[in-house]
Amino acid sequence: MSPAPHGYERAPLPHTRESDPVPHTASTASAMVAEIPVSTPQDSTRPAPPTTGASTKRDAFFDNAKYLAIVLVAIGHAWEPVMEGSRATKALYMVVYSFHMPAFIIISGYFSRSYTGRPQQIRRLLTGIAVPYIVFEVAYSLFKRATNDPSHPISLLDPWYLTWFLAALFVWRLTTPIWLSLRHPLPVALGIAALASFTPNIGEDLNLQRMLQFLPLFVLGLLLKPEHFQLVRRREVRLLALPVFAGALAFAYWAAARMQNAWFYHNSAAQDQGAPWWVGVVMTFALFGCSVVLTAAFLAWVPRRRMWFTVLGAGTICGYLLHGFLVKGAVYSGIFDTNAWLDEPAGKVFLTLLAGVAMTLLCTPPVRRVLRFATEPEMAWAFRREPGSRAGARRSAGKTE
């Protein structure tokens, strides 16, 4: 991504452990990196059917979508240092940035529909999002101090590079009951995003500007139903997606020489980019529409069956959080400055393949197991046992006496 603070830090997310007792309960980790059970979230107005045990099955469609999207994240980061001077590369970059993060956020909202703030959900929110945020925010800050800026502060209120998404997801998930209680939540969210787009003094705490401007996509996910995802899998939608992407690329090629990348990062107001305030409002609605259309086109071509990479969908949070060290390490070491051939077409193809391979390796089960202490900690010691759990333990103990 572009150098802080304007880089597009995106993320994939936290996850649902395979031992979670209720398959339809949304995990604190976003669906971007969450382990998604086959069952889809229940409509918030209807009670979920009873379950009799844990489910370890996952929906291959969403795992495939997460893996493919996180690979695009890595490729986008790899293009950033060599993008200037190449209109075609910038056009591809703009198209990818139009939908890969929005896709993650929409899916995250979709799998947050059952969040009501129950004790188990709060626990997952803390262990699946808050803990990884703290660990990696500190790790990235120490990394930047050691490699590039010795005076870089360590602050949990100022997300750096990739960690903004975890902070945003934490707040979005907490506010889910509010959005589900409103009669028209999407227009309200769009209104908030539009207001943020022309409020330059909104402050940098928790990257609030980006959190508010991306909010409508999360709320849209909350409003989606299973049939909406079935719709994009239809053959006619897949065929329509081809001219949609072709048109997007053609428009991006035209806009590459006229449009700033910062609009896609959503981390600044219109005035910060030298534009009148009303342009922020127009861009809020325009980019929201583009993101939704391109996300649908992307999902239309995501395989529905199990593929060789399906298993990697469960480890996207690891790939997301780790690949930033590789990208920034390469930038700070001067690799892109001392190897001019990387600016050539062959060099960009090499970087694209390298980014895909690196992200694939970082999402593998061994890496996930090694990072479990930070991305999927149990932390049973930190939480009170629920009354029902204590009663069940006493009954079990009585049966064994």
Image (cartoon, rainbow, N blue to C red):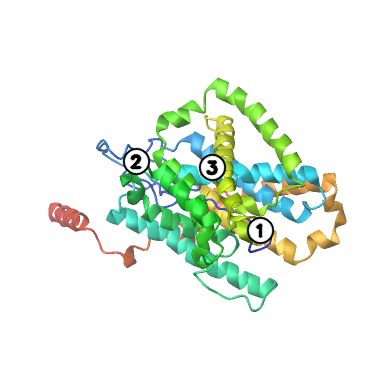
Estimate the x, y position of residue 20 in percent, counting from the top left.
35, 48
Identify residue for label 3: 103
Tell me which residue sits at (59%, 67%) in the image. 140
- Residue 234 relative to residue 24: left or right: right
Q: Is residue 88 above or below residue 178?
A: above
Whether residue 380 appears in this view of the structure is yes
**Disc 2 residue type (three-letter):** His
Disc 2 on helix, strand or loop? loop
- Neighbours of disc 3 within 10 Å: few (<14), some (14-19), many (20+): many
Which type of secondary structure does the marked residue at label 3 adopt?
Answer: helix
Residue 312 visible in the snapshot: no
The residue carrying mark 2 is 24
Element at label 1 = helix
Q: Where residue 42 appears, x then y in whole percent?
A: 33, 37
Q: Amino acid at mark 1?
A: Gln
Q: For residue 226, which quarter of the picture?
A: top left
What's the CA distance linking mark 3 and mark 1? Answer: 25 Å
Q: Label 2 to label 3, Cα distance in Å?
A: 21 Å
Q: Residues within 10 Å of mark 1 (few under 14, many from 20)?
A: some
Residues 44 and 285: in front is 285
Q: Earlier in the sequence, mark 3 or mark 1?
A: 3
Q: Nearer the viewer, mark 2 or mark 3?
A: 3
Quarter-of-image position of residue 254: top right
Badge 2 crowding class, 10 Å Cα cut-off, few under 14, some 14 to 19, many 20 or more, is many
Vertical order, 149 against 103 (above or below): below
Q: Residue at 38% across / 36% down in the picture?
A: 40
Q: Which mark is residue 273?
A: 1
Where is residue 256, by image quadrant? Answer: top right
Q: State the residue at coordinates (50%, 61%).
A: 208
Amino acid type, callout 3 = Ala
Quote the CA–CA distance across marks 2 and 1: 43 Å
